[in-house]
Image (tube, rainbow, N blue to C red):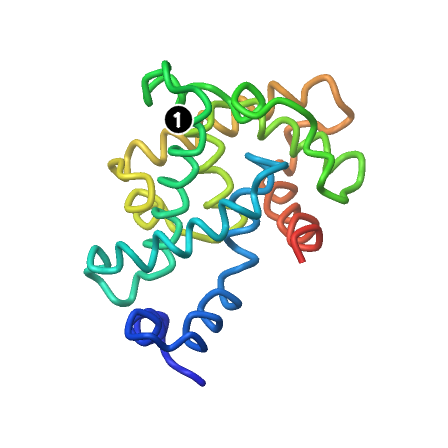
Amino acid sequence: MSGSDAELLDAWAAGDARAGSRLFNRYFLPISRFFINKVPEDHDDLIQETFVACLRSRERLRDKASFRAFLFAVATNVLRMHFRRRRVHDPIEALESCSAQDLSPGPSSVLRVKEEEQALLDALREIPLALQIVMELYYWEDLRTHEIANVVDLPTGTVRSHLRRGRQLLEQALAWTKLDAVGLDQRASSLRTAVTRSCA
């Protein structure tokens, strides 16, 4: 069965389980990448929760061509709700400024990566969650700044500021390693392959 993302979503909503499976298979790896370095232990449940929430909120998909950004927006909300359930007394603004390491302590050992790749993954987990989300969507999912703005519900200028600040923090976090700031953009992008390999 072929079809656009929006067509598959509509067919799934109408009861076509094959359409749902096709949509799930099409986006399993990107959504797995989204969660795996933020919630190393429980990400499988969050992937399932994302697709169910996507189906339930399909009426919010106004631009049929932007399903991918819509799905990542749903995943971002699922992630926020996950951390909210775990830290019910913290305001959501505080959660955004916490890092994934703060919210979900422990190494991202579920990922099978090289030592220098692990250093960058750990550094991503140590920056504020709001910045980590923007950085990973930009480098791993090749989303443009205006698409990321739609995902995280922020102005495009704020997304650009998040990217600049995220790069600065990663460079600072990696200063003690043999990885210097030169080529950080390329390393962050190439890390996608290693993360994808771990998700598959």
Which residue, as the protein is rendered here, is positioned at the far top? 89
Q: For the residue marked with disc 1, what is the amino acid?
A: Arg
Q: Quadrant of the N terminus?
A: bottom left
The residue at the point 44 percent across, 49 percent down is 49
User: What percent of the width, then of the height, locates residue 139?
Assistant: 52, 46
Q: Quadrant of the C terminus?
A: bottom right
Q: Nearer the viewer, residue 193 or 79?
A: 79
The residue at the point 26 percent across, 54 percent down is 57
The residue at the point 33 percent across, 45 percent down is 151
With 125 as the anchor, is 64 left or right in this view? Answer: left
Within 10 angstroms of label 1, few (less than 14), some, or many (20 or more) residues? some
Which residue, as the protein is rendered here, is positioned at the far bottom? 1
With 126 as the anchor, is 87 left or right in this view? Answer: left
Q: In the picture shown, does residue 43 fall above or below 84?
A: below
Q: In the picture shown, does residue 106 fall above or below 30?
A: above
With 133 as the anchor, is 113 left or right in this view? Answer: right
Which residue, as the protein is rendered here, is positioned at the far front? 15
Q: How many marks?
A: 1
Q: Nearer the viewer, residue 194 or 157?
A: 194
With 34 as the anchor, is 119 left or right in this view? Answer: right
User: What percent of the width, then of the height, locates residue 192?
Assistant: 62, 49
Quarter assignment of residue 54: bottom left
Q: Which residue is mark 1?
A: 84
User: What percent of the width, then of the height, locates residue 63?
Assistant: 22, 62
Q: Quick one: SS at disc 1?
A: helix
The residue at the point 30 percent across, 42 percent down is 149
User: What percent of the width, then of the height, locates residue 185?
Assistant: 58, 40
Quarter assignment of residue 19: bottom left
